[in-house]
Image (spheres, rainbow, N blue to C red):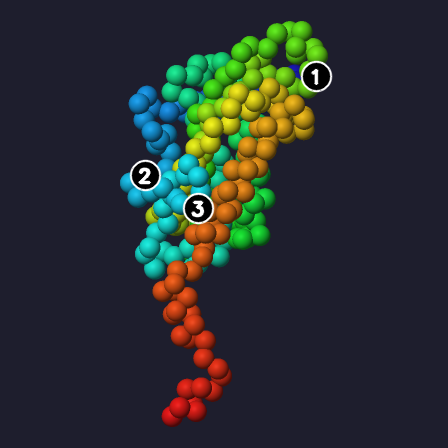
Amino acid sequence: MRAKIAELNQFAFCSLTALLLLATYGCSSQSKTATVKKIPAGSEFSGYLSNYANLKPNPKFERTLSYVTEDPAKNIHRYVAIIVEPVAVYVATDADEKAIPERGRAALAEYFQQAITNAVADAFPIVQDKGPLVLRLRSAIIGVDSGVKISEEQRRLNPGEALERPISLGKVGIEVELVDSETGDQIASAVDRQNLGDGALIGSATFSREERFRAATDAFDGWAFRIREFLNAAHELSSEEIARVEATNQPYGADSDSK
């Protein structure tokens, strides 16, 4: 009898523990749910970047504002690795964020992060942890909106993980910055605005594998390529830096011969 009571008590304890764990997990999951980010009304920028004050038109890239630090102590040439952070998504100021499905936002953010990673991986080793001479690449997709609700018939004709409403990228832009992973100092930044038109839509959570959404994947691939081009341009030595490098490239023994 005592053994039976002990068994019941143990069962009750385990059940209570499980309920407490589920309650705790439920609360923590709710607290970690990402809130929808929205561009502030009347604002030119989203507010995602750590600093916008130094942005200027970039003559090498159409419809792009950019900044690269001139502080030699924070020169991009000094860095040896990069962290590619998860991509943030901001909906348009006048968009109904409830009409933009979360799984659609997640799909486009994941696709863009992978496109960026592929674009910069051969310039800097990709790492996960901050440290000396490690950059953090932060990026955001700005101005996402919802399209016209898809009918049930259209959803049947287009198999796959169809969204109730497509995500429109027609007026989307990107904001990106490189910051020192330890200090948070901004090393370089860019805001790129491209009018993609009405054809750039995402109507499925598997849009990257569906040809009818090729305009969307081409847009993200193109932005990733422009980020790499911007990184290359920021990496270029100035004429003063080239002169300093050339001044140090003397033939072996030249100093001793001159003495």
Mark 3 belongs to which amino acid?
A: Lys
Per the image, label 2 sits on a secondary structure element best described as loop
Residue ID at (40%, 74%)? 247
Q: Position of residue 108 (x, y in %)?
A: 55, 28
Residue ID at (51%, 24%)? 197
| Cα–Cα span, label 3 and label 1 | 42 Å
Residue ID at (42%, 36%)? 63
* Residue 220 visible within the image: yes
Mark 2 belongs to which amino acid?
A: Tyr
Q: In the image, 205: left or right of 229?
A: right
Residue ID at (62%, 21%)? 204
Q: Residues within 10 Å of mark 3 (few under 14, many from 20)?
A: few
Q: Can you tell which mark lies on residue 52? A: 2
Q: Position of residue 222 (x, y in %)?
A: 55, 38
Total numbered labels: 3
* Residue 18 visible within the image: no
Q: Quadrant of residue 31?
A: top left
Mark 1 belongs to which amino acid?
A: Pro
Sequence order check: which comes first, mark 3 or mark 1? 3
Q: Can you tell which mark lies on residue 159? A: 1
| Cα–Cα span, label 3 and label 2 | 19 Å
- Disc 2 vs disc 1: Cβ atoms closer than 8 Å? no
Q: Can you tell which mark lies on residue 60? A: 3
Per the image, label 3 sits on a secondary structure element best described as loop
Q: Camera-side residue: 196 or 221?
A: 196
